[in-house]
Structure formats: C-alpha cells, structure tokens
Image (cartoon, coloured by chain):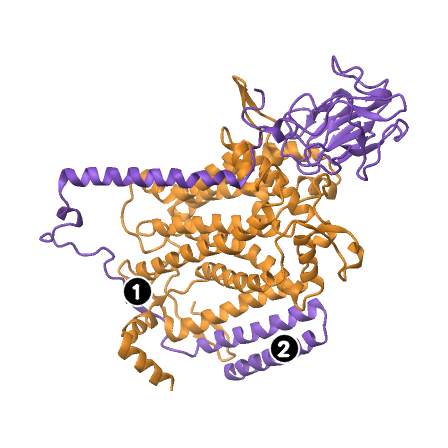
Amino acid sequence: MRDRAIIISLLASAAASVGLAIAFLAEGGLAAQGILLAIALAGIGTALVMWAHTLGEGEVAEPRGELATPTDPESPGPGATLSGPSRRSFVGSLLGAIGALAVALLSPIKSLGRSPESALRHTKWAAGIPLVDADGHRIFLGALEIGGVATVFPEGYTGDAVSQALLLRVDPKRLQPLPGREDWSPDGYIVFSKVCTHAGCPVGLFENTRDQLLCPCHQSTFNVLAGAKPVFGPAPRPLPQLPITATTDGALVALGDFPEPIGPGFWNRDT
Amino acid sequence: MLREVGAKLDERTGSNRFLQAAMKKVFPDHWSFLLGEVALYSFVVLLATGVYLTFFFVPDAEPITYTGSYVALDGITMSRAFESTLRLSFDVRAGLLIRQIHHWAALVFIAAIVAHLMRIFFTGAFRKPREINWVIGVALLLLGIVNGFAGYSLPDDLLSGTGLRIAYSIAQSIPLLGPWLASLGFGGPYPAPEIIPRLYTLHILLVPALIVAVLSVHLALIVRQKHTQFPGPGRTEENVVGTPLWPRFAAKSTGLFLMVSATLVALGGLFQINPIWLYGPYHPSQVSAPAQPDWYMGWLEGALRIFPNWEIRAFGFEIPNVFFPGVLLPGITFGILFAWPFLEARLTGDHQIHHLLDEPSARPWRTSIGLAALSFFMVLFIAGSNDVIASRFQLSVNAVTYTLRVLVLIVPPLVGAVAYRIATERSSGPPRRPTEETIVRSEGGGFHTHD
C-alpha cells in the first residue's frame, strides 16, 4: 500500500515536471508554472517522507556525555606561561595600536555622505522665486478654486524632495492667520511644506470639506485654517508655512524660505 | 563505485570516522522541532531564487524610459532598478514566479524564525547550556528583518521608497549622531541615489554572508550540545532519544525541504505579492494609501502610528517623536530578547544544566510574560493597519487609533494575568499523564479501551 503510494507520488512529480517544461516552452501562465513546480517538488518530498518510515530502526537513545572538557589539575592554564608586568604593558600597547588604527580607518567614512546640515535647515525657496507645478509651469491667481490643492516647487527645482510644498486655496474669510503672517495668503492661497513633521512622508491628502491635511502614512492631521496645526495623530508640530505673495501680473512667488526647518525632528533643530 | 571513492577518501582523510559519527546523530521527534528546519529550508530557497534574480536586477537609480511589455507604464520615466524589476517580472522566463517565490520565502523565513523562537522560549530550551545559541538565534532574527527590509526596498517603487523615507527620519531622530548617521548611511540627504546600490550590496552580500556564518555556528552548537527533548518514557537528562540522522531522519528532512519548497513555489505561483507595477515608480512628492510594510515590520509601523505626538524639548535640544517608537522600542525589544536567558537565570537562581524541556504551564511566570509580550506586539501589528480597519468597518480612523492606544496598554497585563491563572491551575492540578490502559482491537477493526 505504502509502496504504491510512494511510486504514485514520484510519478505525479515526473508528470508535473514534464508539464512544467512544456509550460516554460509555451510561455504558460504564472499559476500553471507555480502549481506544476510545486507538485514536482512536493511529489518527491512526500515520497521521501513515506520512504523514510521504512528505513532504519526508528527511535534510539543516544547518551549525551559531558559537555565540559575534563580539567587536569596538574596542567598549567594557557595564561600561566606568560609573565607578569611585561605582559600587561604589551597588551596595553597592543590595544592602543589597534585603537589608533581603528580611528585612522574611520576617517574615510566621511566619503559615504554629505553634511546633512544645509538640507536640514534650508530649502531651495528664496525671496522672489516663483511657484511652479509638477510640470514646471508658473502658477497664477485663479489657478485654483476654493478647496483646490496642487503640489508646488520652486522654479528650477521641480520635483525637489526637500522644497516640495502644497498650495491650497481656502476661503479667506475663514482663515485664521498666525500673528505676523496676515499677508502670507493672498486671495486665500496658502502654502505649507509637504514633508510631514512626523516621519517625513508627503502629506498627500487634502480633505477640503474638513479643511484638513492628512498624511496617509501615519494619519497625522493638520488644520489648514489655523497654520497647519496638528489636530490628530503622531505629528508633533505644524507644517511650516511658506511666505508667498502675488506679483502685479498675478504670479505667485515666495517671499523667502520657510521660517523654520521642514520635516521630522532632529536633536539640535532649535539652535 | 561510490564505496570505492569513499574508501579512497577515508584512506587520505579519515572521513569515515566522522561520517559514522554524524550518521548516528539522533534527532528527537516533535512537530515543533520542525519550525527551525522550515526557517533553514526557506533560507535555502531564498539563496537559490535570489541568485536567479541578481542575473536580471540592476541596482541603479539612474532614470530611464520604460519600453517593456507592461503597456500601462510604457513611456514612463523611472529608475533602472524599477525598470529592471518590471523587466524581470514580465519579460524574463519564470522571472515573476521566481521573484514572487523569493518574496514569499522571505515572509515565511522570518515567520518560521519567530515561531521557532516562541517554541524555544515557552519550553525553556534556552537555559544552560544553550544561552549562546539563543543569542545567536535572536541575531539571526534581526539579520532576517534587516535583509527583508533591504530587499523589498530595492525595486525603488512608491511603497518601498516611502518606507526608506521613514527609515531615514528614524535614523535622523537619534540624539547627537542622527543627522550625520542618516546622511552617511543613505549617501546624502534623502533621497540620495546612492542608497539603491548600497542596499543591494547589503542585501545580496553582506547580510546573507553574515547569516550563513552565524547559522553555521547555530547548527554546529546544536550538534555539539545535542537536542533538547520533552520528558517522557526513557528520556532523561543523560540521553537523547530520537531517530538517527541516517537513513530515516535524512530522508524525512529532505522530504520536508522539498515540501517547504513546494509550499513557497505554490504561494509564488498562485498569490500575487508586492505588485510594484500597481504602485508605480518612487517619487518623493507622491505617496499611496493604504500603505502597509511586510508583516515583520508591522509592529514598528503600528508603534509609529499610535504613539502620541510627544516630542521632548529642553535647553534648545529635542528628542524627536519617532525616536521613541522607531529607535527605543526596537532597542528595548531586542535588548530584552538577547538578555532573556541570563535575566531568567538571575531571577530564578537556576544555574543548572537542562536538556529536558518544560511544559509551558509548568512555568507560569515565564509563560505569562511571554504571552503578554506577544499580545503587546499583536496589538501594535494590528495598529499598523488602523487605516485599513477604519475604512473596512466604516469607522473613524481617529476612534480606531484612540482605541488601540488604550488596548496596547490594557491587553498585555490582561493576557498575562489570564495566562498565569490558567498555567498555575493546570500545573497544580493532578498530573495529566495518560493512565495505563489496555487497548483492544475489535472484530470490526476499531479500537477501544476496556471498561
């Protein structure tokens, strides 16, 4: 009975292998390839396990023996042949030399990356730089309806990860600008950094019926009417606001860089 | 012929003495002892499929225009890494199958390690003399997670790119060193193109080589110390009862290897995994939702989501929010895991050698601590999908998050207390050994006891 099952299992495997070769040659479907290869492998596997039960004597007991090496009280330990004071000074100097070598070998590590400082504290935004959309086109008053949203970049840096920002248009009457920022939102156009202050994801979702921005990564939520103050989720700080104005021909331009570092925190962010 | 070669080899190396000893090595039989083998065999499948993938994958962030056979992305500019992943998925014979097997094998590899770790923990198999092998095993889990993360970041798709962005923010959050550490590791402020080839070297060379080395020590120690076994008739601290390596165990285990392979192949052939062509190429200003990482990162993702919006600030310095769930939590988790055998020996004062395993209920403290910890990570894992839960059950994501913040604090002590209660009741009651009975075969072929 078992013998027959073993043979059938092996035959099924062989048949599947033939089918697999045909499937490869005929560029058969993914599922067919997977199933046939699985049957080919499982057939041999099942046969082996069934065959195993006919082999050898089954369970036996094996003595464990002692793990620890038997100690000979007569023989001197490995340290005993070394002498006292010279050994200490040798080991000390050896460690010193190895330490110095390690420090020397550390220095090329600098080549691995650039200083993080400028990217942490500055973006490509500066006074007079026009806002452009993802295709590099300038943005003018009238580009958005109230409740509209667009991802914007500084002109010349389309796609820049650090400078990416969200241009929103909200009802100017409902806006509660922070003190000193009353003229940063011409005609209800307002710009916040798109990099979440929690873990750096793009804050991709504008819930315009609730006037909230939501980060899809960890659900941090920001109130766009109140300076992008976080109202839910793990984000600890508002999204930095970009000062903008409209030129005489209606183009939106930055008045300067973000007033504080964008994105997630770092230890000396405030200094 | 084979015998002749063997004899010649033995004359020159004395190989027969070693082989004869090895063939007699005894393997105790219990289903839970297969978990480590499943991990080992998944790793073999990972190596085999991974080598095939290296023939076609190009670890390069340089932009290129796609012209392959996946029409929906025709003419789109993407990195060489993403383009070559599409190409090996759609234009290389068996490419998608191998890629999906590789990804499934990674998930099963880490799942088997975790299950194996649970078996070792709850039966006390980590006790003296096996503390070193426990530490090595935890190191293997850590290496597996690191390599899994590195691997799924390689295709440079929208999902994995977002994951890398979060990893950068977590590295940056470390006090004093963070900003430099992140920039040096990633090749510059995020996103730097250097990260893809670096992850590739890590993923296909450095970490696998480490895993092979550490795994070899793991297995060598098992051979040296011999297996643990559950108590039972004829099983003592002085012996180990089971099937010898040759021939029965060898045949059975090879069979298991093929069946593990078969399962992984079937998963790869039938169940779509990481369809990067649906996510699209990574762009730093784009993001997809819902976004969940591979399962073994779920607890960290959940912790990031439900940790309150705290940020500690003093004297012009700050500890950023993600430091707590992203650095401190995994640091403490793996710190306790590494230290557990030594912690437990100190707390119980038990410094004896143990080869016989514990029934989990015989050690109520250990079992309840372990189950409480598991439930803690389970709640975090669920929290990693709070947005999916909210949309599936039409709930507010805020309500789901608040609930999970409470659950993560009350579920673990509750589970621990219940487990402690059950374990003490079971271990203090009458012994649950089967009583001696005569089993009789009836004429109809059934079996029953005398009564």
Residue marked by disc 2: A16
> Is A25 placed left or right of B333 in the picture?
right
Q: Quadrant of residue B8?
A: bottom left
Q: Is residue A84 above or below residue A239?
A: below
- Residue B3 locus on image (x, y percent): 35, 84
Tell me the subunit letter for badge 1: B
Q: Which chain is purple?
A: A
- Residue B195 locus on image (x, y percent): 59, 45
Cα gap from disc 1 to disc 2, whole angstroms: 44 Å
Q: Quadrant of residue A168?
A: top right
Q: Are the residues flagged by discs 1 and 2 from a single subunit? A: no
Q: Which mark is residue B97?
A: none
**Please, what is the three-letter code of the amino acid marked with disc 1?**
Gly
Graded by Cα atoms within 10 Å as few (under 14), some (14 to 19) or many (20 or more), the crowding at tag 2 reads many
Q: Is residue B344 above or below residue A170?
A: below
Residue at screen point 70% across, 58% down? B86
Tell me the subunit letter for badge 2: A
- Residue B269 locus on image (x, y percent): 66, 65
Residue marked by disc 1: B234
**Please, what is the three-letter code of the amino acid marked with disc 2?**
Ala
Q: Is residue A78 above or below residue A101?
A: below
Q: Which chain is orange?
A: B
